[in-house]
Image (spheres, helix red, strand yellow):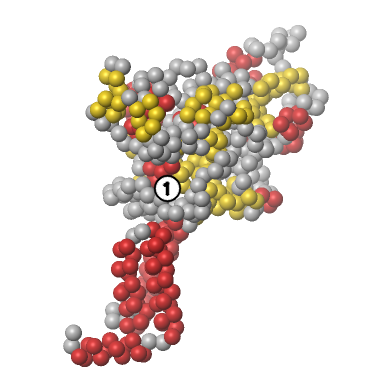
Amino acid sequence: MKNSEKKGFAQRICEAKRKQWVKFSMAVLLCIASTIWSGALWILLLIPFLGDLYVTKYIPWGAWKQSNNKTVRTVAEWVDAILFALVAVYLINIFFFQNYKIPSSSLEKSLLVGDFLFVSKMSYGPRIPMTPLSFPLAQHTLPVLNTKSYIEHPQWEYRRLKGFGDVELHDIVVFNFPVGDTVPEKISNPDYYTLVHQYGRDFVWNHPNEFGRILYRPVDRRENYVKRAVGLPGDSLQIMNGDVFLNGKKEAEIPGLQYNYLVETSSFISDKAFESLQVSKDDRMMINTHPQLQGILNRYAPTPSGRYNYVYRIPLTAEALAKLKNFKSVISVKREPADIFSGKTFPLKMDNGWTRDDFGPIWIPKKGVTIAINTANLPLYEHAIRNYERNKLEVKGDQVYINDLPATDYTFKMDYYWMMGDNRHNSADSRFWGFVPEDHVVGKPIFVWLSLDKDKGFLSSVRWNRIFKSAH
């Protein structure tokens, strides 16, 4: 380096104001903290650039501000602001928090349809993006354009930074839909694997007019779901008559838990009565008006005129159930049997007679634990071994092969969770598609920052009593 250049550098250092040094020092501390947190040493390479940005200023970072052309300055200001906003939103959304809107009633009455949640990524530790090249705030599809919001390559291996803690029992958790790796473009429910079980793989793939294109989505680009963790890694879970048992012990009932009931009445239930029971319009079904459900009416005695009384299918909490039984028009109330509306439970390939209300026992995989594997229990863990932990899995006769080697046991690489909704008969959850791997966990809802009731008019739709209400 020439003497004049050394002198120029020294002059720049000497002429730097205290404000510049303070900004530089704060940026360096942030770099060091980020390096310690993430373990990414490359972040330290930013320090020389920060030194020039705040102190020496050899590179004319803000040269556009000195332009005499007003148009150039205006365009550059907008580009600078937009880029800064996109980077800031991208980093905040990945590492700190994101917004999530409750789309279905699976967690009522804990969380309601129309609740907007503040979801903390720090609670369980933020994931390093698996598909880093993506558009901020778009999960997998860009609105209007209807194209993918991410570039599939590169894809990084799963890695989670340190957070405030781990998933605990009864936590409400946002996670990526585990069996959402393969998605028929036109049908989201039931999931792809259920459709293949019902119709056969060739039928699903060869009928694009009915199912649409078959899409693949990386882990962090699958749909976001929100459920309650009712089983943790290493737990043995069983459901008997709707009650959850963990490791042989009955779990206390969660406040606000609800089940579906068939309610026979002599007259209509009014909107006002439904509102008093806190049953939304979408959750009110009159069996009499659905010709395909007439078999349910056959479970009831007809009136002397040969007609049937009104039969409703509605979800109720214990409190709402007690209130309903006092209605003068109510003739009978029965909890909805598992043989109607329920569908096939997990695992699809095992004919075990399990239902949504009587399920298991089933052991939830825990990282580092080895279990015996055979053709009898393989359907329980097949998807985890093959799809989640990316092993080649085959069965030849009575022998299981993992990565082309005969296998009689398997050691899990990840922790898994059992997730269920509080609206037990209206929740597509682990009872139907199985375990949630740890790499699918997104974050923990902290509070409701906005809540809109779609059954109400525009001015009265805001549920003011739910704003800033804890999500737990």
Name the side, left or right, on which 139 lies relative to 312.
left
Amino acid bearing label 1? Gln
SS for callout 1 = loop
Which residue lies most toward the left here? 2
Q: Is residue 390 visible?
A: yes
Q: Camera-side residue: 205 or 385?
A: 385
Task: Assess disc 1: are there few (<14), some (14-19) or many (≥20) residues with their C-alpha within 10 Å of its C-alpha.
Answer: some
Number of marks present in the image shown: 1
> Mark 1 sits on what residue?
139
> Residue 65 appears in which quarter of the rendering?
bottom left
Q: Quarter of the image containing the N terminus?
A: bottom left
Q: Residue at x 28, y 49 (%)?
A: 153
> Residue 30 appears in which quarter of the rendering?
bottom left
Q: Camera-side residue: 304 or 263?
A: 263
Name the side, left or right, on which 233 lies relative to 7.
right
Name the side, left or right, on which 302 lies relative to 200.
right
In percent of width and height, residue 130 lies at: 35, 49
Q: Residue at x 48, y 57 (%)?
A: 96
In percent of width and height, residue 286 lies at: 65, 24
Q: Residue at x 34, y 60 (%)?
A: 40
Q: Residue at x 49, y 41 (%)?
A: 225
Whether 27 is drawn above or below 466: the answer is below
In percent of width and height, residue 389 lies at: 34, 37
Name the side, left or right, on which 442 lies relative to 35.
right
In percent of width and height, residue 204 lies at: 35, 26
